[in-house]
Amino acid sequence: MMRILIAEDDVELRQLFYRVLTKNGYTAVCVSNGQEALDVLDREYIDLIISDIMMPVMDGYELVSSLRDAGISIPVLMITAKDAFDDMRHGFQSGTDDYMVKPVNVNEMVLRVEALLRRARMVSERRQVIGDTVLEYDSMSVVSGGVSMSLPQKEFMVLYKLTSYPGRIFTRQQLMDDIWGVDTETDPHTVDVHIGRLRERFRNNPDFEIVTMRGVGYKAVKRHV
Protein backbone atom coordinates (compact mmCIF):
# COMPACT_ATOMS: atom_id res chain seq x y z
CA MET A 1 0.00 0.00 0.00
CA MET A 2 1.36 3.42 -0.97
CA ARG A 3 2.40 5.61 1.97
CA ILE A 4 1.74 9.36 1.77
CA LEU A 5 3.15 11.92 4.18
CA ILE A 6 0.93 14.95 4.87
CA ALA A 7 2.80 18.02 6.16
CA GLU A 8 0.12 20.58 7.11
CA ASP A 9 -0.20 22.73 10.22
CA ASP A 10 -3.96 23.30 9.82
CA VAL A 11 -5.49 20.49 11.89
CA GLU A 12 -8.84 20.39 10.07
CA LEU A 13 -7.24 20.35 6.64
CA ARG A 14 -4.74 17.72 7.72
CA GLN A 15 -7.54 15.50 8.98
CA LEU A 16 -9.54 16.04 5.77
CA PHE A 17 -6.59 14.98 3.61
CA TYR A 18 -6.04 11.98 5.88
CA ARG A 19 -9.65 10.81 5.54
CA VAL A 20 -9.74 11.28 1.77
CA LEU A 21 -6.45 9.48 1.17
CA THR A 22 -7.23 6.52 3.45
CA LYS A 23 -10.66 6.21 1.83
CA ASN A 24 -8.87 5.92 -1.52
CA GLY A 25 -6.62 3.11 -0.34
CA TYR A 26 -3.50 4.97 0.76
CA THR A 27 -1.70 4.84 4.09
CA ALA A 28 -1.40 8.40 5.37
CA VAL A 29 1.07 9.77 7.91
CA CYS A 30 0.47 13.26 9.32
CA VAL A 31 2.89 15.91 10.62
CA SER A 32 2.54 19.65 11.28
CA ASN A 33 5.79 21.07 9.84
CA GLY A 34 8.74 20.35 7.58
CA GLN A 35 11.11 19.28 10.34
CA GLU A 36 8.66 16.66 11.55
CA ALA A 37 8.38 15.47 7.94
CA LEU A 38 12.16 14.99 7.75
CA ASP A 39 12.06 13.08 11.04
CA VAL A 40 9.45 10.70 9.61
CA LEU A 41 11.50 10.19 6.45
CA ASP A 42 14.47 9.17 8.62
CA ARG A 43 12.36 6.37 10.13
CA GLU A 44 9.89 5.29 7.46
CA TYR A 45 9.57 4.72 3.73
CA ILE A 46 7.27 7.28 2.07
CA ASP A 47 6.08 7.22 -1.54
CA LEU A 48 4.83 10.81 -1.83
CA ILE A 49 4.59 14.01 0.20
CA ILE A 50 1.72 16.49 0.31
CA SER A 51 3.05 19.68 1.86
CA ASP A 52 1.72 23.07 2.80
CA ILE A 53 4.08 26.02 2.27
CA MET A 54 3.42 28.23 5.29
CA MET A 55 4.29 26.07 8.33
CA PRO A 56 6.14 26.78 11.60
CA VAL A 57 9.70 25.56 12.30
CA MET A 58 10.36 24.59 8.66
CA ASP A 59 8.17 25.66 5.74
CA GLY A 60 7.40 23.74 2.58
CA TYR A 61 10.07 25.45 0.49
CA GLU A 62 12.76 24.52 3.02
CA LEU A 63 11.46 20.95 3.24
CA VAL A 64 11.60 20.36 -0.51
CA SER A 65 14.96 22.08 -0.89
CA SER A 66 16.38 19.89 1.90
CA LEU A 67 15.15 16.76 0.16
CA ARG A 68 16.50 17.73 -3.25
CA ASP A 69 19.85 18.86 -1.82
CA ALA A 70 20.14 15.40 -0.24
CA GLY A 71 19.41 13.74 -3.59
CA ILE A 72 15.97 12.48 -2.50
CA SER A 73 13.60 12.47 -5.49
CA ILE A 74 10.36 11.56 -3.70
CA PRO A 75 7.40 13.29 -5.44
CA VAL A 76 6.03 16.38 -3.68
CA LEU A 77 2.62 17.96 -4.17
CA MET A 78 2.67 21.49 -2.75
CA ILE A 79 -0.59 22.91 -1.42
CA THR A 80 -0.82 26.55 -0.43
CA ALA A 81 -3.07 29.55 -0.05
CA LYS A 82 -0.74 31.56 -2.26
CA ASP A 83 -1.61 31.78 -5.96
CA ALA A 84 0.85 34.40 -7.24
CA PHE A 85 3.11 33.31 -10.10
CA ASP A 86 6.27 34.15 -8.12
CA ASP A 87 5.18 31.82 -5.32
CA MET A 88 4.50 29.04 -7.81
CA ARG A 89 7.86 29.65 -9.48
CA HIS A 90 9.61 29.50 -6.10
CA GLY A 91 7.89 26.20 -5.38
CA PHE A 92 8.93 24.61 -8.67
CA GLN A 93 12.47 25.95 -8.41
CA SER A 94 12.82 24.42 -4.96
CA GLY A 95 12.00 21.03 -6.49
CA THR A 96 8.22 20.71 -6.14
CA ASP A 97 6.61 18.31 -8.63
CA ASP A 98 3.07 19.69 -8.64
CA TYR A 99 1.16 22.58 -7.12
CA MET A 100 -2.41 23.17 -5.89
CA VAL A 101 -3.95 26.34 -4.46
CA LYS A 102 -6.39 26.36 -1.53
CA PRO A 103 -9.30 25.80 -1.30
CA VAL A 104 -8.36 22.34 -2.52
CA ASN A 105 -10.72 20.11 -4.47
CA VAL A 106 -9.92 16.81 -2.75
CA ASN A 107 -11.07 14.74 -5.75
CA GLU A 108 -8.60 16.63 -7.94
CA MET A 109 -5.95 16.14 -5.27
CA VAL A 110 -6.41 12.37 -5.44
CA LEU A 111 -6.08 12.47 -9.24
CA ARG A 112 -2.86 14.49 -8.96
CA VAL A 113 -1.49 12.07 -6.37
CA GLU A 114 -2.23 9.15 -8.69
CA ALA A 115 -0.52 10.93 -11.60
CA LEU A 116 2.60 11.74 -9.55
CA LEU A 117 2.91 8.17 -8.29
CA ARG A 118 2.43 6.79 -11.80
CA ARG A 119 5.09 9.16 -13.14
CA ALA A 120 7.50 8.17 -10.35
CA ARG A 121 7.05 4.50 -11.25
CA MET A 122 7.79 5.20 -14.90
CA VAL A 123 10.94 7.12 -13.98
CA SER A 124 12.12 4.22 -11.81
CA GLU A 125 11.46 1.87 -14.73
CA ARG A 126 13.66 4.12 -16.91
CA ARG A 127 10.78 4.60 -19.31
CA GLN A 128 8.64 7.69 -19.84
CA VAL A 129 5.31 7.84 -21.67
CA ILE A 130 3.59 11.05 -22.75
CA GLY A 131 0.57 10.46 -24.96
CA ASP A 132 1.64 7.96 -27.63
CA THR A 133 5.30 8.97 -27.37
CA VAL A 134 7.60 6.64 -25.44
CA LEU A 135 11.08 7.57 -24.19
CA GLU A 136 13.36 4.58 -23.48
CA TYR A 137 16.19 5.67 -21.19
CA ASP A 138 18.47 2.67 -21.69
CA SER A 139 18.56 3.04 -25.48
CA MET A 140 18.33 6.86 -25.48
CA SER A 141 15.53 6.52 -28.02
CA VAL A 142 12.12 8.05 -28.60
CA VAL A 143 9.30 6.13 -30.28
CA SER A 144 6.45 8.12 -31.78
CA GLY A 145 3.97 7.14 -34.49
CA GLY A 146 5.69 3.78 -34.83
CA VAL A 147 9.02 5.45 -35.67
CA SER A 148 12.05 5.10 -33.37
CA MET A 149 14.62 7.89 -33.13
CA SER A 150 17.92 7.66 -31.22
CA LEU A 151 19.10 10.93 -29.70
CA PRO A 152 22.50 12.20 -28.54
CA GLN A 153 22.87 11.56 -24.82
CA LYS A 154 22.53 15.13 -23.54
CA GLU A 155 19.56 15.91 -25.82
CA PHE A 156 17.78 12.78 -24.64
CA MET A 157 18.44 13.55 -20.98
CA VAL A 158 17.10 17.09 -21.32
CA LEU A 159 13.97 15.78 -23.02
CA TYR A 160 13.55 12.96 -20.50
CA LYS A 161 13.84 15.41 -17.62
CA LEU A 162 11.26 17.81 -19.06
CA THR A 163 8.72 15.15 -20.09
CA SER A 164 9.01 13.34 -16.75
CA TYR A 165 7.31 16.37 -15.17
CA PRO A 166 4.90 17.90 -17.71
CA GLY A 167 4.09 21.49 -16.78
CA ARG A 168 6.95 21.85 -14.32
CA ILE A 169 9.38 24.69 -15.04
CA PHE A 170 13.10 23.93 -15.01
CA THR A 171 15.59 26.77 -14.99
CA ARG A 172 18.62 26.66 -17.28
CA GLN A 173 20.83 26.22 -14.21
CA GLN A 174 18.77 23.31 -12.89
CA LEU A 175 19.14 21.50 -16.21
CA MET A 176 22.86 22.25 -16.28
CA ASP A 177 23.37 20.95 -12.73
CA ASP A 178 21.30 17.79 -13.26
CA ILE A 179 22.60 16.81 -16.69
CA TRP A 180 26.05 18.36 -17.15
CA GLY A 181 26.92 18.35 -13.43
CA VAL A 182 27.41 21.13 -10.91
CA ASP A 183 31.15 21.34 -11.62
CA THR A 184 30.86 21.59 -15.40
CA GLU A 185 32.63 24.41 -17.19
CA THR A 186 30.22 24.19 -20.12
CA ASP A 187 28.53 27.46 -21.06
CA PRO A 188 24.99 27.43 -19.59
CA HIS A 189 23.65 28.65 -22.93
CA THR A 190 24.35 25.17 -24.31
CA VAL A 191 20.97 24.29 -22.77
CA ASP A 192 19.33 26.72 -25.19
CA VAL A 193 21.11 25.00 -28.10
CA HIS A 194 19.88 21.58 -27.00
CA ILE A 195 16.34 22.90 -26.52
CA GLY A 196 16.46 24.36 -30.04
CA ARG A 197 17.52 21.01 -31.50
CA LEU A 198 14.80 19.16 -29.61
CA ARG A 199 12.16 21.60 -30.83
CA GLU A 200 13.30 21.05 -34.40
CA ARG A 201 13.24 17.26 -34.02
CA PHE A 202 9.81 17.17 -32.41
CA ARG A 203 8.08 20.18 -33.94
CA ASN A 204 5.39 17.92 -35.40
CA ASN A 205 5.04 15.65 -32.38
CA PRO A 206 1.32 15.44 -31.49
CA ASP A 207 1.87 14.70 -27.81
CA PHE A 208 4.05 17.46 -26.39
CA GLU A 209 5.88 20.70 -27.01
CA ILE A 210 8.67 22.52 -25.18
CA VAL A 211 7.66 25.97 -23.97
CA THR A 212 9.97 28.81 -22.95
CA MET A 213 8.99 30.61 -19.75
CA ARG A 214 10.70 33.92 -20.38
CA GLY A 215 13.08 34.85 -17.59
CA VAL A 216 12.48 31.54 -15.81
CA GLY A 217 13.29 28.46 -17.89
CA TYR A 218 11.64 25.70 -19.90
CA LYS A 219 8.84 23.20 -19.52
CA ALA A 220 7.25 20.41 -21.55
CA VAL A 221 3.50 20.63 -21.95
CA LYS A 222 1.03 18.15 -23.34
CA ARG A 223 -0.63 19.18 -26.56
CA HIS A 224 -4.42 19.26 -26.57
CA VAL A 225 -5.79 17.15 -29.41
Image (cartoon, rainbow, N blue to C red):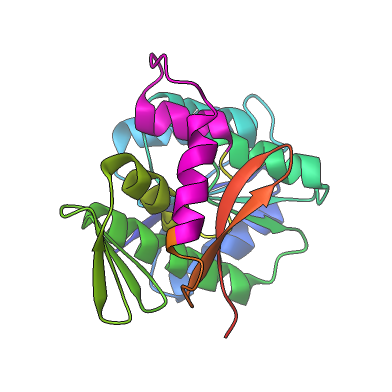
Residue 67 showing in the rendered view: no
104 drawn magenta = no
Picture quadrant of residue 221: bottom right
Q: Could you tell me which residue is drawn at 69 percent across and 38 percent down?
A: 216
Q: In the image shown, does 120 or 145 lie closer to the viewer?
A: 145
Q: Position of residue 134 (x, y in %)?
A: 30, 69
Q: Main secondary structure of the magenta part?
A: helix
Q: In the image shown, does 162 or 99 lie closer to the viewer?
A: 162
Residue 160 showing in the rendered view: yes
180 drawn magenta = yes
Q: Is residue 63 left or right of residue 56?
A: left
Q: Could you tell me which residue is drawn at 45 percent across and 54 percent down?
A: 198
Q: Is residue 181 above or below residue 198?
A: above
Residue that protrudes farthest toward the left in the picture: 138
Residue that protrudes farthest toward the right in the picture: 84
Q: Could you tell me which residue is drawn at 53 percent across and 35 percent down?
A: 64
Q: Is residue 133 above or below residue 183?
A: below
Q: Position of residue 104 (x, y in %)?
A: 71, 65
Tell me the quadrant of the picture where the C terminus can be found.
Answer: bottom right
Q: Is residue 6 left or right of residue 150?
A: right
Residue range of the region highlighted in magenta in the rendering: 171-200
Picture quadrant of residue 93: top right
Tell me the quadrant of the picture where the N terminus can be found.
Answer: bottom left
